[in-house]
Amino acid sequence: MSMLPGGRAEVLGLVGAVWGLAGLSALLVFAVYRLWGVVVAGMEWPWGWQHIALASVNAVFMAWSEGWRGFQRSFSPRVAARLKWLRDHPSTVRAVFAPLFAMGYFGATRERLIGIYALTGGIVVLIVVVHLLPQPWRAALDIGVVLGLTWGIVSTLVCAWRALGGETYDVEPDVA
């Protein structure tokens, strides 16, 4: 538990968990907002069958890989478990940097740290590569990312609701 006196520890834990969820959600919503602008701009270009085919296949792939497999089955439940752990084991550093703690950027097992930093590096590379593409190719790819991230926002909020609203949550938070 925390080194803080009873009531202050509970408040810090709750504030940290809420800030962690709000900060992460804001980051994801901002990404969807920015990418949606790219998709809308791409709709002004003429689309051929190949653009429509790419957008369709990519939307299904990203819904499965990013939305369901990445967020709903892995990232979102772990974020929720880490938010619950933060609420129950508050510290000032974890509360201040709660969005980063919830995502696993610190205070995580070695395997989780390696995974989150490798994933982040891969995402950065993909962002740079896709950013170099001309329209409407970029929009055709970003449609799938918007779908996957939106799925991720919803699944993260649902998992957090379950984790923070109940007594038990059977997902390992991978805390070091």
Image (spheres, rainbow, N blue to C red):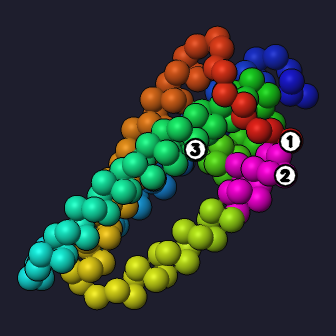
Q: Provide the residue designation for mark 1.
A: 176
Toward the right, the furthest residue is 3
**Where residue 110 is drawn, which disc sits there?**
2
Q: Which residue is mark 3?
A: 75
**Alpha carbon distance from label 3 to label 1:** 17 Å
Q: Which mark is residue 11?
A: none
Residue 175, percent across and down? Answer: 80, 38
User: Element at badge 3?
Assistant: helix
Q: Number of labelled discs? A: 3
Q: Is residue 106 magenta?
A: yes
Residue 38 image point, x, y percent: 27, 73
Which tag, 2 or 1, sits closer to the chain's start?
A: 2
Mark 1 surroundings within 10 Å by alpha-carbon count, few (fewer than 14), some (14 through 19), many (20 or more) = few
Crowding at mark 3 (Cα within 10 Å: few <14, some 14-19, many 20+): many
Query: Residue 33's image quarter?
Result: bottom left
Which residue occupies 66% across, 21% down?
A: 170
User: Which residues fall within the magenta stretch?
Assistant: 104-117
| The quadrant where residue 34 appears | bottom left
Contact between marks 2 and 1 (CB within 8 A): the answer is yes
From this view, report whether residue 81 is shown above or below residue 133: above
Precedes in sequence: disc 3 or disc 1: 3
Q: CA distance from mark 2 to mark 1?
A: 8 Å
